[in-house]
Amino acid sequence: MPPHPKRKHSKGRRDRRRSQDALTATQVVACSNCGEQRLAHTVCPNCGFYDGKEVIAKKPAGK
């Protein structure tokens, strides 16, 4: 048989352990160039701009 705890852990101790389990939503912002939603502090995957400057050259959509 496996070993069992000698004393019961309190609810506070259990809840403090579980306090790290909560998930947080990712932070999204609107791109200042095209208005598309993107992750904060990253290059926009739609237009390739970051901080008002073109970082990645993107081809036009129709060509």
Image (cartoon, helix red, strand yellow):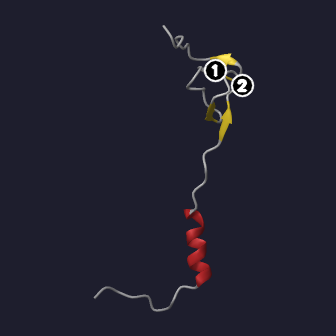
Kind of residue indicated by mark 2: Ser
Sequence-earlier tag: 2 or 1: 2
Callout 2 secondary element: loop
Q: Does residue 36 lie above or below 17 as drawn? A: above
Instruction: Locate residue 38, reporting x and y percent.
Output: 61, 33
Q: Does residue 36 lie above or below 57 as drawn? A: below
Pick the front one: 19 or 24: 24
Callout 1 secondary element: strand
The answer to whether marks 2 and 1 mark residues whose Cβ atoms lie closer than 8 Å is yes
Q: Is residue 50 left or right of residue 3?
A: right
Instruction: Locate residue 30, reporting x and y percent.
Output: 68, 32
Pick the front one: 57 or 8: 57
Instruction: Locate residue 59, reporting x and y percent.
Output: 52, 11
At 63% across and 29% down in the image, what residue appears? 36
Q: Does residue 46 lie above or below 10 as drawn? A: above
Neighbour class for label 2 at 10 Å: few (<14), some, many (≥20)?
few
Q: Does residue 41 lie above or below 18 as drawn? A: above
Instruction: Locate residue 29, reporting x and y percent.
Output: 68, 36
Pick the front one: 62 or 28: 62
Kind of residue indicated by mark 1: Phe
At 60% across and 67% down in the image, what residue appears? 19
* The disc label shown at residue 31, or none: none
Q: Please give the residue where the numbered disc 1 appears in the rendered image.
A: 49
* The disc label shown at residue 32, or none: 2
Count the labels in the image. Answer: 2
At 56% across and 13% down in the image, what residue appears? 57
Looking at the rendered image, the quarter that the N terminus falls into is: bottom left
Neighbour class for label 1 at 10 Å: few (<14), some, many (≥20)?
many
At 53% across and 85% down in the image, what residue appears? 9
